[in-house]
Every structure is written in C-alpha cells, then in structure tokens.
Amino acid sequence: MKIFETERLIIKSLKKADKKYFAELFTDPRILELIPQKAFTENQITERFDKSLNLNLNDLSNRKCACGIFEKGNAELIGLALFLINENDEKELGYRFRVKYWGKGYGTETTKGMLEYYFLKMNESKVTADVNIANVCSVKILDKFMKPVCEFFNKRDNCTDRRYELEKNNWLQQWL
C-alpha cells in the first residue's frame, strides 16, 4: 500500500521480499554508528520486520510504524520512513537509508514528504524529530525544516540527542 510519494521516491508498506534489505538497515555498522544503535539479532530483525508487514493507514496515527522507501521504477528497498511517537506522546519522524543511497538528497526529500503527510493527510498540529548530534548529515536535514528545542543525553543509545519540532502553522507559512 502506497503511503505517499515525492518527486523521486515512493513510501509504502513493506512486503516479504524486502526483508534482506530491511535487515541491512539494522545490521550495517556504518548506519548504526550514526543512530547509534547496536546491531539487531536475527530474531530481533524478524520480530521488527513482521510488525511492519500488513500496515494500514490507521496504524500511522496509533503506533510506531516503519514504511519502506523506494526509488520510483526500482523495487529494491533503499530505506525506512519511521512514523514514531516519542515519550511525550508527540508524533515524531525518523528515517534511515542503506549506505549506497547516501548523499543523493533522499533524506531531505523524505523529511519534506513526511512533514507534508503528517500535516496535510494526518492533520497533526506538531511533529518532532530526535537526532544524535554526531550525525551531521541528519542534523543539516532537520535544520532545513525544523527548529531545535533542546539537547539531552540519551541513556539507551549513550549519545547526546537534539530534539527538533515544527508546528503545522509554521510549516504552512514556510513551505506552501
């Protein structure tokens, strides 16, 4: 099921055939060091992947969801668009890409598309995002769209995160 598309990308629910590349997103040390996160075990990958199958649109509002990111015309999973809910029960966006797709502007394109989806389709009033401050590329992406509101030590991931937020009315004035 297609969630939304951008100029070059389609964000849609995952299929069983996507598991190989899904696993790469949770095991490649080059990806994980920026989050930071420990590599998932095979069981953790299977559990997370199975939760992401058979997604419906209501799930995006009610729980944490991972959707596949695909280049138009290419059936290969290149990344994940993450529809999250933070500890303050606020909507949060996230994303990650396979290394061979870094540096192509897909993070910026996905972030813009996710914000549009949150505000115009889901009618959310505010969206947040957290990033490890050492993840310079993602910091630059979030700086384009959102306002930093605080930094905090993330005990679980053992890093300093920066929280960003964007309110719908500010987004409408800036991007529409």
Image: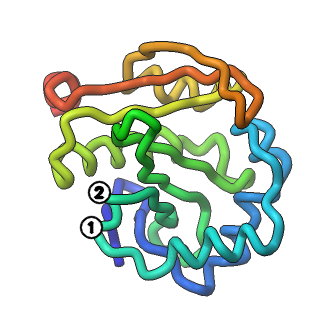
Residue 93: quarter of image: top left
Could you say which is closer to the camera, residue 36 or residue 90? Answer: 90
Please name the residue shown 69% across and 38% down the image. Answer: 35
Please name the residue shown 71% across and 36% down the image. Answer: 156
* Numbered label attached to residue 58: 1
Residue 29 in picture, x, y percent from top left: 85, 48
Residue 148 in picture, x, y percent from top left: 44, 16
Task: State whether residue 109 appears in this view.
Answer: no
Residue 38 in picture, x, y percent from top left: 81, 48
The answer to whether mark 2 and mark 1 are in CB contact below 8 A is yes
Measured in 3D between alpha carbons, the distance from the residue under mark 2 to the one under mark 1, in whole angstroms, is 6 Å
Mark 1: which secondary structure?
helix
| Left or right: residue 22 compared with residue 15 | right
Location of the N terminus by quadrant is bottom left
Please name the residue shown 73% across and 35% down the image. Answer: 157
Q: Kindly identify the amino acid type of the residue bearing the numbered disc 2.
A: Ser
| Left or right: residue 64 compared with residue 34 | left
Which residue matches tag 2?
Answer: 61
Q: Is residue 55 above or below residue 6?
A: below
Q: Residues within 10 Å of mark 2 (few under 14, many from 20)?
A: some
Residue 26 in picture, x, y percent from top left: 73, 58
Q: Is residue 156 above or below residue 46?
A: above
Location of the C terminus by quadrant is top left
